[in-house]
Image (cartoon, helix red, strand yellow):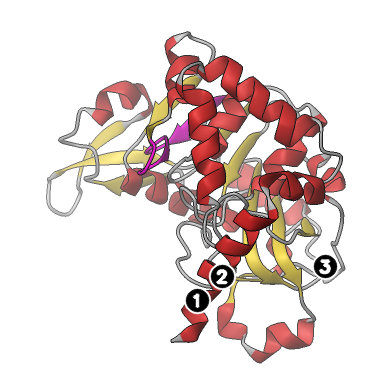
């Protein structure tokens, strides 16, 4: 449902935009997300995925969440298999190029227990951009000649351009209830800085009604001010800041660590023959049994962690 400008403006005006400390735990941040919310996931595929936040949502027992993301990897498998979400709005859903199309996703969607709503990658970005701009739609030519359009045609409109007379497709804005984004560093107030590719994470905070930031480390506001150009979204968009080292594991965080490839191989192998049983065993071992994110990391293995860290930090050796 597209939200009117008056409603968006009223919700924005009602937000607490004061400069205040917002540091909290994963569990406290998870409590800000309610059953039935639309949650946008930052990063892209296996890059800067807020996996620790998803871990917290699974443990909190959230239900009936709708998720959206530019490109989805094994985070979508966890969401479907755990039952916290039954709908994913995205452009691509795979464990990763190495492991192919997600068997968990196919099993849940083909059995009718979950929904994969597919848009083009460009369309996802333009829908978030429209949400960030406070406009109800974004005109585009994306998907006009694609079969991808057929599955979501009921949500689209066509118009004749008032300047050229050409046909344009109108993409409805996306305004998630919550955006969860992992970054390299952030101050206690929510000024977040990103290294590497930004993906759609500049528009997400402006489009969402509430933003939860997980960060590799919390730094002082003085340090943030030394490089203000690296602050990709400001404090007044952010509701919560959670310091979670390795908060994207087993995915990667640019400049800090690469994907935990052996662990991802293990997950793919566990879900290969029996997606349901394999996912259930994985969730029990890495989500339900550990009592902290640190314990989950320890179960992934120190060897994997160190190998991923060496690889991630190698970009600083040039």
Residue matched to label 3: 18
Q: Residue at x 68, y 28 (%)?
A: 283
Whole-percent x, y for residue 146 in the image: 19, 33
Q: Earlier in the sequence, mark 2 or mark 3?
A: 3
Q: CA distance from mark 3 to mark 1?
A: 39 Å
Q: CA distance from mark 2 to mark 3?
A: 39 Å
Q: Residue furthest bottom?
A: 226
Tell me, yes or no, if residue 66 can be seen here: no
Whole-percent x, y for residue 133 in the image: 49, 56
Q: Secondary structure at mark 1?
A: helix
Q: Secondary structure at mark 2?
A: helix
Residue matched to label 2: 310
Does 90 lie within the magenta span? yes
Residue matched to label 1: 314
- Residue 252 vs residue 178, the one in the foreground: 252
Question: Relative to residue 252, is residue 144 drawn left or right?
Answer: left
Q: Are marks 1 and 2 in contact (CB under 8 Å)?
A: yes
Does 254 lie within the magenta span? no
Q: Residues within 10 Å of mark 2 (few under 14, many from 20)?
A: some
Quadrant where the image shows the C terminus: bottom left
- Residue 58 vs residue 179, the one in the foreground: 58
Whole-percent x, y for residue 276 in the image: 56, 16
Magenta-highlighted residues? 84-99
Question: Relative to residue 164, is residue 296 drawn left or right?
Answer: right
Q: CA distance from mark 1 to mark 2?
A: 6 Å
Q: Residues within 10 Å of mark 3 (few under 14, many from 20)?
A: few
């Amino acid at each position: 449902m597209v939200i009117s400008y008056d409603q968006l403006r009223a919700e924005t005006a009602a937000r607490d935009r004061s400069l205040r400390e917002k540091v909290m735990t994963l569990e406290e941040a998870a409590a800000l997300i309610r059953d039935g919310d639309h949650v946008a996931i930052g990063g892209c595929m296996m890059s800067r995925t807020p996996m620790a936040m998803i871990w917290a949502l699974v443990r909190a027992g959230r239900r009936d969440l709708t998720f959206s993301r530019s490109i989805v990897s094994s985070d979508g498998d966890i969401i479907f298999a755990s039952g916290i979400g039954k709908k994913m709005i995205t452009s691509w859903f795979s464990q990763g190029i190495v492991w192919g199309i997600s068997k968990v996703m196919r099993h849940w969607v083909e059995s009718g227990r979950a929904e994969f709503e597919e848009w083009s990658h460009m369309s996802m970005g333009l829908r978030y951009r429209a949400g960030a701009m406070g406009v109800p739609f974004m005109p585009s030519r994306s998907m006009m000649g694609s079969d991808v359009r057929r599955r979501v045609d009921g949500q689209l409109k066509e118009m004749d351009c008032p300047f050229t007379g050409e046909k344009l497709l109108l993409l409805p804005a996306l305004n998630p209830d919550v955006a969860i984004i992992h970054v390299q560093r952030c101050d206690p107030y929510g000024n977040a800085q990103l290294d590497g590719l930004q993906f759609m994470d500049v528009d997400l905070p402006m489009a969402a009604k509430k933003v939860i930031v997980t960060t590799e480390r919390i730094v002082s506001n003085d340090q943030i001010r030394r490089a203000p150009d690296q602050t990709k979204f400001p404090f007044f968009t952010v509701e919560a800041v959670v310091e979670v080292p390795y908060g994207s594991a087993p995915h990667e965080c640019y400049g800090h660590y690469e994907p935990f490839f052996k662990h991802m191989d293990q997950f793919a192998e566990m879900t290969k023959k029996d997606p349901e049983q394999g996912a259930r065993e994985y969730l029990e071992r890495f989500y339900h049994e550990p009592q902290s994110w640190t314990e989950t990391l320890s179960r992934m293995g120190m060897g994997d962690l160190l190998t991923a860290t060496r690889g991630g930090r190698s970009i600083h050796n040039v």
